[in-house]
Amino acid sequence: MSNDTPIQYGEVTATYFWDDGSGINGDTGAPAGGEPMQKGLFSSPSWPLGTEGYIEYEGEQHEFFIGDRGPGEPSNDCDVLLDIDGKTFADMMGEEWNDESLVVNGGNGHAEVEYFITEWGDGNGEEGAPHPFQQPDNKCEDAVAPVPEEHLPQEEEDEEEAEEEQAEEEQAEEESEDSSEKQDEQEAEEEEQQDAASATSEDEGSDDGVTAETAANDLSGFGLMNAEGTPSAAGLLTLAIIPAILIALAFAWIRRPSGAHAGVTDDSGKGLMAQSEGRHGIASIIDRLRGKDE
């Protein structure tokens, strides 16, 4: 109950009572609210029966509910406006409660307390400022004051903190998304650069291959083979010409003049076509093979 939000606050003078129907020490009978006398049952001259709240005395809180009417004459002139059960009053004052005499041993029988009403009861009585017993027109307005800020709910502050936390979370999410987008863009740029580099490398390799092939064709001088791997017409012609050239060169060599050096002019003027008679001639070699040169 003490954690509920107060709907009315004030300061009043309080005394104590214990009406259990025993008739001891001025007992006036059982409480008017129908609940048995117990710790936490307070009495008010005007507030509705069943009203709930708590009082605060020297920094300590004590919960209560209104279960009886009183005090009587002490409430005149708005003097004493709250009756506290004897056991709670003894605890509040740091004294002992005497169950036999129904009194608080030692201490003062009155105390200035702060009250906090958290819920109005639905029993007989009037809400708002208290009034003396059976004097409804004599409102004790001085017994009501604004609720202290420390006892007000912290909903506004909690809402502000929640909004700040939400804003921070949203900002963190946005920063995370921005960072992720930048990282994706960077990765995309790197991928594009890698693709461009790969394409350039392939183009250069293709150019090199064409150049090398062209160079090979230039060096060979002839396209001997066609696409199917068989000799082409040009290749066949080349193969036919090469033996003829070789035969002509051999014939010229055989017919060259004798002497220490090939190409020495003979007396007949035939040059390389003159019949060979020297040791270097092909005929001389053939004669030796036949055994004519002994």
Image (cartoon, rainbow, N blue to C red):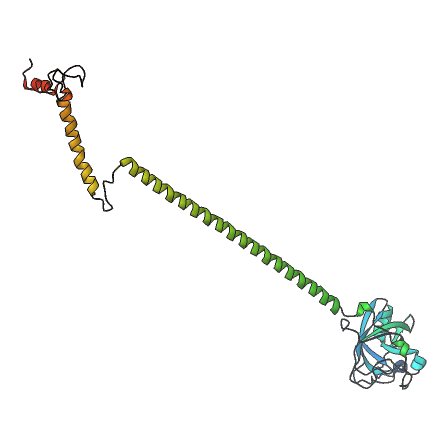
Instruction: Tell me if residue 199 can be seen.
Output: yes
At x 15%, y 26%, the residue is 250
User: Above or below — where is 184 with respect to 274?
Assistant: below
214 to the left or right of 264: right
User: Above or below — where is 212 with respect to 102?
Assistant: above
Residue 36: x and y in percent read: 79, 82
Q: Quadrant of residue 153?
A: bottom right
Q: In which quarter of the image is residue 45?
A: bottom right
Q: Tell me the quarter of the image containing the N terminus.
A: bottom right
Residue 15: x and y in percent read: 89, 76
Between 174 and 106, the one nearer to me in the picture: 174
Q: Quadrant of residue 274?
A: top left
Between 135 and 22, the one nearer to me in the picture: 135
Q: Tell me the quarter of the image containing the C terminus.
A: top left
Residue 277: x and y in percent read: 10, 16
166 to the left or right of 183: right
In the displayed image of the protein, which residue is found farthest to the top?
A: 294
At x 18%, y 37%, the residue is 239
Instruction: Tell me if residue 39 can be seen.
Output: no
Between 67 and 28, the one nearer to me in the picture: 67
Residue 168: x and y in percent read: 67, 60
Between 243 and 45, the one nearer to me in the picture: 243
Total residue callouts: 0
At x 83%, y 78%, the residue is 42
User: Above or below — where is 20 with respect to 205?
Assistant: below
